[in-house]
Amino acid sequence: MFSVDGAWLADTASKSIPPFITFLLGLLVGNWRKIRRLIGRKDPIQVFVERNPAIIYANMPDWITFPQFVPLDRHTQSEPPKNTLALWGWAKALGGSPAWFDEMQVTLAAWADLDVVVDSLRVSARAHQVPGGVVALKPVGGASMQPTQLDVVLGTFSTTVTPRRAGSGEPRDWFAFQLKAGDVQRLLIHVSDNPEQDADVAAYEWTAFLDLIVNNKRKTVEITDGGKPFVLVRRNRFQTIEV
């Protein structure tokens, strides 16, 4: 039986490959994990949006109510939860949307090999058509909380974004910050509407845009509700029921 010595074959093959090819192969093998990360990246930073108040305010008492719009008659399909923090999940399962205001927690994570400057947050809003429905409200009492870091006021003519100090709610003039390689930053965003604008608009759909500077180049990351615009139903547009 004919056999070939493995060591001799490998040595012969290595000698037949030009040195620069061997060098390139070595680079590829040694940096394969990094190359895979670069190829697989969609955005220069990782963005995760948490919208469920039961998670954002976990273990907090029922100090804040979170009104929810639910399409007509669907609010009778299941018993609403007793905890006001759970009302968002109940309404979402019925095809509902936040009403009057919305709060979300946005987590930004830098890649392990890339520094990023987060420069600003912009928001674009327009009118959104919703079916007939009701706003489910669970009245609560107690102290108010002001952990908001970005205060967004929607309008079709203009939407404002005001940076605020976490905890106090006091306005501040700047928002930009740096995410060094591997850093994580968490923002709490409060979204409402301007009652003096858009009298004929019952609801808004809106999208946020995070402006970045990466390697001295401008980049923009879109923040959406799973690829779709966020929706906010305005106050005094639909019947409100206490649940």
Image (cartoon, rainbow, N blue to C red):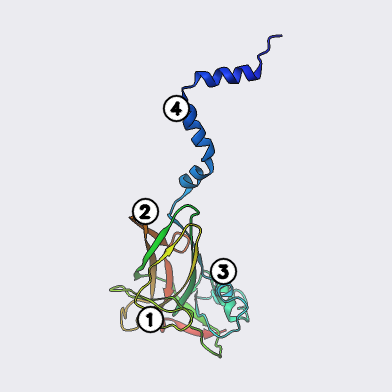
Q: Are marks 2 and 1 in contact (CB under 8 Å)?
A: no
Task: Determine which quarter of the picture holds residue 199.
Answer: bottom left
The residue type indicated by label 1 comes to Pro
Q: Earlier in the sequence, mark 1 or mark 4?
A: 4
Q: Which mark is residue 28?
A: none
Label count reads: 4
- Give the number of the mark in front: 1 or 4: 4
* Number of residues whose C-alpha sits closer than 10 Å to that of mark 4, classed few (under 14), some (14–19) or many (20 or more): few
Question: Image quadrant for the C terminus?
Answer: bottom right
The residue type indicated by label 3 comes to Ala
- Give the number of the mark in front: 3 or 1: 1
Identify the residue position indicated by label 1 in the image: 171
Find residue 50 and report its horizontal and vertical position in percent.
Answer: 52, 68
How far apart are labels 4 and 3 at the CA level? 59 Å
Q: Which mark is residue 215?
A: 2
> Taking 201 as reference, is 26 left or right?
right
Identify the residue position indicated by label 4 in the image: 20
Find residue 54 and report its horizontal and vertical position in percent.
Answer: 58, 74
Identify the residue position indicated by label 3 in the image: 93
Q: Are marks 2 and 3 in contact (CB under 8 Å)?
A: no
The residue type indicated by label 4 comes to Phe
Residue that protrudes farthest toward the right in the picture: 1
Mark 1 falls on what kind of element?
loop
Q: Is residue 112 visible?
A: yes
